[in-house]
Every structure is written in structure tokens, then in C-alpha cells.
Amino acid sequence: MRVLITGASGQLGRALVSQAPAGWEIVAPGRDGLDLADGDAVRAAVLAARPGLLLNAAAYTAVDKAESDEETALSVNAAAVGIMAETLRETGGRLVHVSTDFVFDGASQRAYRPDDERAPISAYGRTKAAGEDAAGSDALIVRTAWLYCAGGRNFVRTMLHLMRTREEVRVVADQTGAPTWAPGLARVILALCGKGATGVFHHCDAGLASWYDFAVAIREQALALGMLNRRVPIIPIASNDYPAPAARPAFSVLDCSRTRDLLGESAVHWQENLRKMLEEEKAIG
């Protein structure tokens, strides 16, 4: 089967490419190979590849920049998705679209279920919600959160850098979510594809954490692996102490039970996957 993977140079895209089943013919343009803000280019890429499956791992993810550039974010996160879906209906392929916890407002007292009402509080969240709508009811939509992997641009690697270069690190402690290892997400997406799943599913690693909790775990595991040579103080702060253009959900834990039930498996705790990532990061050097 021919499979088109967008965003192939990103964290999730690389993981999807590396875990693709034998027998798949992968077409994987990176950011430079396909501009999702160019609708004509998106349609041409789908028509050229005529994939049986399109895994859309690309997105406009600059959350703060989207507040002043929502038009571009909408082009990438929604309009391009609609073009993919429409073109695939012509060619007969299936669409898998990756979405985000940012479609929720963060006011819930429990983990968000796939069918909970969306109420995005940022431009990024609005454009991702619009992308879900554009994908259509026949697509597989997988929401995730707090994604990271070895060698990528993410919170874990940023924290490692700051802990090596600063006397202390200040981290927001009043936003709660679930860190998610990109290779684990890729495996779940491929498993859902194998089940022929459609509709909305959630995947994050088990457990929950604040960004502060996540940073402390990064420090402790990195020290144990010899990746840091000193225990840098980590200072918990409030979101208001670190103002940003875009609002973030205060609580964005996703209920992944629908995914677990379909696949018949339990989730790996985020601390276990964090260690796997750090071991890979250490090996990379």
C-alpha cells in the first residue's frame, strides 16, 4: 500500500516513517517538500501519490505566533486538511489526522473524552478544531498532547539545555497534562489504522503532571543517567508569572479509554517513556 506521510521531518512524522509496516510504500515529503499553506500544492501532492492512506502529522504548532498569524495557522491546520479529505474522497484513500488537547478550554474536573464539547481558548486551538471538522466523519482523528522525542524540538530538550546553562530554572506549575512520547503515539496510530478505526480517539502516556513535575522528573532521570552534573534548582511559578500571547488550558488530560479498549492494551506511564527518550538522547550525544 502506498502511504503519504505529511510532516515527515517532525517528531511524530519521523516516528511514523521508522515504524511503518513492511510492504508500505512511503511517500514522505518534509516541510520543504510540501507547503501546507499552499492549497494547490496539497491537492497536487495527494493526486500525485494517490495514497491508500494519508497520515497527516504536519501542523502549524507555533502556539503564541498563531495569535497574530491565525490566517496562516488556519490554512495549514484546517484548509489543507479539508483539501486532503476532499481529494482522498476522489482517489479512494483514507485520512488520519493528528489533533491536540488545545481544542479544549481546560476547565474540566476530569479527563476529556473524545466526544466532549470543544471550547478552544487560543488561535491555535481554534484552527485545530477547524481541522478536525475539515477532516470529516470518515477520517481517523487522534488527539494527543505534550509531545516529545529524542532529537526533536520539545520541552525535554529545552529543559536539559537550561539546566546545563542556568543557575536555576523557573517552570509553570499550574498547567496539568500528560507528556507523550512520539514513538509511542506513532505505534498507537498505526495500530488504530490496522483496526480500520474512524472517528475521534485520544492517546497520551499514562499518568499526569504539571510542567513543573515534568521538569523535576527530567532533572532526576538525567542526573541518574549522567546527563547532568549538578542538581539545578527548579522553581515552580504560576502561568501569570510567565505571560504569553496565547492562553493555555489549565487542565488538558485526555481520557484514552476508548483507544485502550479498542486496542486491548494498557498505556505506558510517562516516566517510563521519558527514561527511554533520555537514554536515546544520551546515545545520540
Image (cartoon, rainbow, N blue to C red):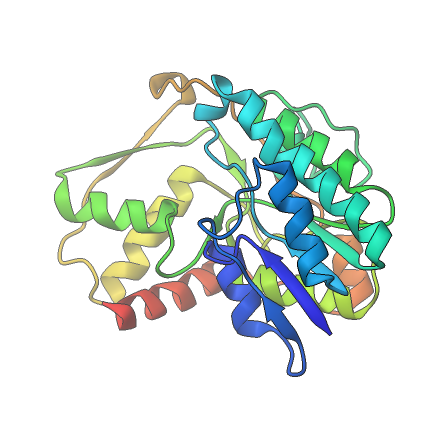
Task: Give the number of marks.
Answer: 0
Question: Residue 2: where, in percent of width, then height?
Answer: 70, 70
Give residue 159's quadrant in the image.
top left
Residue 80 to residue 32: above or below = above
For the C terminus, the quadrant is bottom left
Question: Residue 80: where, in percent of width, then height?
Answer: 66, 39
For the N terminus, the quadrant is bottom right
In the image, 145: left or right of 232?
right
In the image, 167: left or right of 151?
left
In the image, 219: left or right of 91?
left
In the image, 109: left or right of 165?
right
Residue 244 to residue 268: above or below = above
Residue drawn at (12%, 38%), measured in percent from left and top? 167
Question: Residue 255: where, in percent of width, then height?
Answer: 71, 46
Residue drawn at (64%, 45%), measured in percent from left and top? 42
Residue drawn at (67%, 59%), measured in percent from left and top? 48
Residue 121 to residue 35: above or below = above
Residue 59 to residue 272: above or below = above
Can residue 61 be seen at all in this image of the molecule?
yes
Question: Residue 178: where, in percent of width, then height?
Answer: 55, 46
Can residue 98 be seen at all in this image of the molecule?
no
Give residue 25's quadrant in the image.
bottom right
Residue drawn at (47%, 63%), measured in percent from left and top? 273
Which residue is the extreme one toward the bottom?
22
